[in-house]
Image: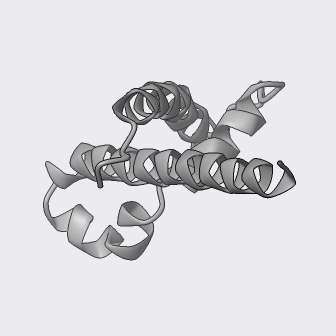
Amino acid sequence: MKSFNKNIFVISIVILGLLLIPGFFAAWGADEGDPNQSFPWPFLRICFEVLRFPSHTLFWNFILKFDALFFLGFAFNIIFYSFIVERLFFFVRKFRKGKSDKET
C-alpha cells in the first residue's frame, strides 16, 4: 500500500478516540440511570455504540474473561475504523481524479 496516507490515518485515530472517550462516559451514565441526558450525551452514546463494534460486540464473552482486553478492544476498534476512513479518503480521491481525467 504505497498510497497509504499516514496523516489521515493519525488524524482519524485522534478524532475517533476523542469521540470514544466521552461516548464511553455517556453510555456509562445512561446505564447508571442518569436523568441528565441532554445534548450532546445521546449523540456521544450512539457514537460509543458504533465504535464498540466489532471487538466488544463479537467477542464480549471472551473480553469478560480477560479484563485487560477491554481497553485493547477499543484500541483495535479505533485502528480498524481509522483504516477504513483512510481507505475511503483514498477511494474518493481516486474516483474524483479519474472523473476529472475523463472530462478533459
Question: Could you tell whether 13 is left or right of 99 in the image?
Answer: left
Residue found 68% across the figure and 32% down from its top? 34
Question: Could you tell whether 35 is left or right of 84 in the image?
Answer: right
- In this view, the residue farthest toward the front is 104
Compared with 5, 83 (above or below) is below
Viewer-side residue, 12 vs 30: 12
Viewer-side residue, 36 vs 74: 74
Residue found 58% across the figure and 53% down from its top? 88
Image quarter where the N terminus lies is bottom left
Residue 62 picture location, percent across and down: 22, 72
Residue 60 picture location, percent across and down: 34, 69
Compared with 65, 77 (above or below) is above
Q: Give the total number of marks visible in the rendering.
A: 0
Viewer-side residue, 64 vs 59: 59
Residue found 57% across the figure and 34% down from its top? 23
Residue 95 picture location, percent across and down: 68, 56
Residue found 86% across the figure and 52% down from its top? 103
Viewer-side residue, 59 vs 104: 104
Visual colour scheme: one colour
Compared with 15, 50 (above or below) is below
